[in-house]
Amino acid sequence: MVKFPEADKRLFKNIFVCKKCKTKIKAQPLKVLADKITCKKCGRHVFRPLRKK
């Protein structure tokens, strides 16, 4: 899908999706794994990485 690495980093690096309300959040992976990041919309701590199509 992405032709060059700069666009790949911009679109997919450090972007996570809430598993309940599907809101996108940009955060560091270590903070997401440590449950320090909460969803702005629903308040949960469960995220998944953004899927590449």
Image (cartoon, rainbow, N blue to C red):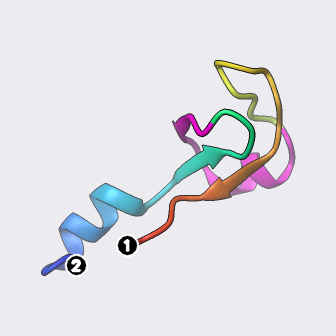
- Residue 49 on image: x %, y %: 60, 61
In the image, residue 7 above or below residue 25: below
* Helix, strand or loop under label 1: loop
Quadrant in the picture for the C terminus: bottom left
Q: Residue furthest left?
A: 3
Crowd tier of the residue under label 2, counting other residues whose Cα lies within 10 Å: few below 14, some 14–19, many 20 or above: few
In depth, the one of 8 and 1 nearer the eye is: 1
- The kind of residue on which mark 1 rests is Lys
Residue 16 included in the magenta stretch of the image: no
User: Which residue position is annotated with label 1?
Assistant: 53
- The kind of residue on which mark 2 rests is Met
Q: Residue at x 86, y 49 (%)?
A: 34
In the image, residue 34 above or below residue 48: above
Residue 15 placement, left or right of 12: right
* Helix, strand or loop under label 2: loop
In depth, the one of 4 and 22 nearer the eye is: 22
User: Which residue position is annotated with label 2?
Assistant: 1
Residue 2 placement, left or right of 44: left
Dots 2 and 1: beta carbons under 8 Å? yes
- Residue 2 on image: x %, y %: 20, 76
Give the Cα separation between the discs numbered 2 and 1: 7 Å
Q: Which mark is residue 6?
A: none
Q: Residue at x 74, y 46 (%)?
A: 31
Residue 26 included in the magenta stretch of the image: yes
- Residue 37 on image: x %, y %: 74, 34
Residues drawn in magenta: 22-35
Choose the circle earlier in sequence order: 2 or 1. 2
Q: Quadrant of residue 35?
A: top right
- Residue 11 on image: x %, y %: 31, 57
Residue 26 placement, left or right of 11: right
Quadrant in the picture for the N terminus: bottom left
